[in-house]
Image (cartoon, rainbow, N blue to C red):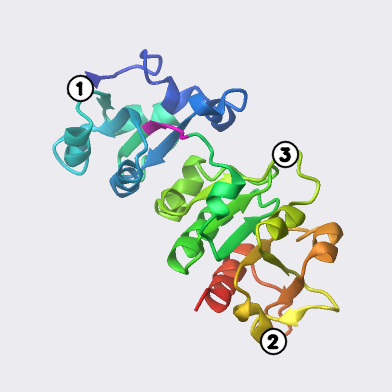
């Protein structure tokens, strides 16, 4: 292994951790050569187990023979950059929560058909842009039996550093992909794959989430909308079901992350 001590913010090789924005790391023009940052030993291990290829590691000195030791042993051919906690905080712009970051190669995105091939329950994330909510939705999807996650192009990148951390690495456990940029109606695409669609929204025509036909559907796509405005009228009008979570105490709705956990549990395949 190659341990490299850094004492300045311009050290060659550390640009992934400090000078590139999330959009630059993602590399929209050439996504197969994109990079993402995984934070904390636990999350890095999940990514490695899922087959993601590491590029370099950044960690506090104390973690080289501590929390990061097994990771370094698994990845002997990558550079390990280290320094004091203060230097690393200046470098990254924030205090490392678990003292270890790993830059990793992105994988090629699978097709919608391949992700949905053996799925009976999928979630569509439509226009959700908050990284914390994205991470929480993925964590619930993994824990509560969703087979895949599909995202509209307007949604936040699941491999954003904060989204990964909030998900506790669940973004590496559930198959996911982007819905085609040019798709006029992704619900029609899903119906072509044998899915019925359930839009989570408040509507005069909505049915309660414990409506028996919902759970009985062989293949169901659960559509979750953006934090502020919810789903568009076009999406709601095109859904096979419009579904609400009954509320008490005059509360009108839940945060999208909380609502997703309720929906996934109730509508999971039994």
Mark 3 or mark 2, earlier in chain? 3
Please tell me which of labels 1 and 3 falls first in the chain: 1
Judged left or right of residue 177, residue 86 is left
**Residue 17 position by quadrant:** top left
Q: What type of secondary structure mainly makes up the magenta span? A: strand
Instruction: Determine whether 137 is above or below 157 in the image.
Output: below
Which residue is located at x 76 percent, y 56 percent? 188
Q: What residue is pinned by disc 2?
A: 249
x, y (%) of residue 254? Answer: 65, 71
Is residue 105 on the magenta stretch?
Answer: yes
Q: Which mark is residue 181?
A: 3
- Span highlighted in magenta in the image: 103-107
Image location (x, y in percent) of residue 99: 30, 40
Report the side of 37 relative to 24 (left or right).
Answer: left
Give residue 3's mark. 1
Q: What is the spatial separation of the Cα atoms under label 3 and label 2, in whole angstroms?
A: 40 Å
Q: Residues within 10 Å of mark 3 (few under 14, many from 20)?
A: few
Instruction: Classify 105 as above or below 167.
Output: above
Which quadrant does the N terminus fall into?
top left
């Amino acid at each position: 292994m190659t341990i490299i001590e850094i004492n300045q913010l311009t050290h060659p090789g550390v640009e992934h951790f400090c000078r590139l924005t999330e959009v630059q790391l993602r590399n929209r023009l050439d996504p197969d050569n994109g990079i993402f940052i995984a934070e904390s030993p636990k999350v890095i291990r999940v990514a490695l187990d899922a087959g993601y290829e590491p590029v370099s590691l950044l960690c506090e000195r104390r973690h080289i023979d501590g929390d990061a030791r097994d990771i370094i042993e698994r990845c002997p051919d990558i550079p390990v950059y280290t320094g004091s906690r203060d230097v690393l905080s200046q470098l990254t712009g924030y205090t490392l929560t678990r003292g270890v970051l790993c830059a990793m190669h992105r994988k090629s995105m699978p097709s919608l058909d391949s992700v949905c091939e053996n799925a009976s329950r999928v979630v569509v994330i439509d226009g959700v842009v908050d990284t914390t909510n994205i991470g929480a939705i993925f964590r619930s999807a993994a824990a509560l039996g969703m087979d895949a996650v599909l995202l509209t192009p307007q949604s936040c990148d699941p491999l954003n550093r904060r989204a990964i951390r909030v998900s506790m690495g669940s973004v590496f456990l559930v198959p996911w992909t982007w819905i085609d940029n040019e798709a006029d109606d992704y619900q029609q695409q899903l119906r072509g794959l044998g899915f019925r669609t359930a839009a989570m929204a408040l509507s005069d025509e909505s049915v309660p989430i414990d409506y028996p036909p919902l759970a009985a559907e062989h293949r169901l796509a659960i559509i979750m909308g953006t934090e502020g405005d919810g789903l568009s009228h076009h999406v709601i009008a095109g859904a096979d079901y419009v579904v609400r979570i009954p509320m008490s105490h005059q509360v009108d709705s839940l945060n999208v992350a909380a609502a997703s956990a309720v929906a996934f549990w109730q509508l999971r395949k039994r």
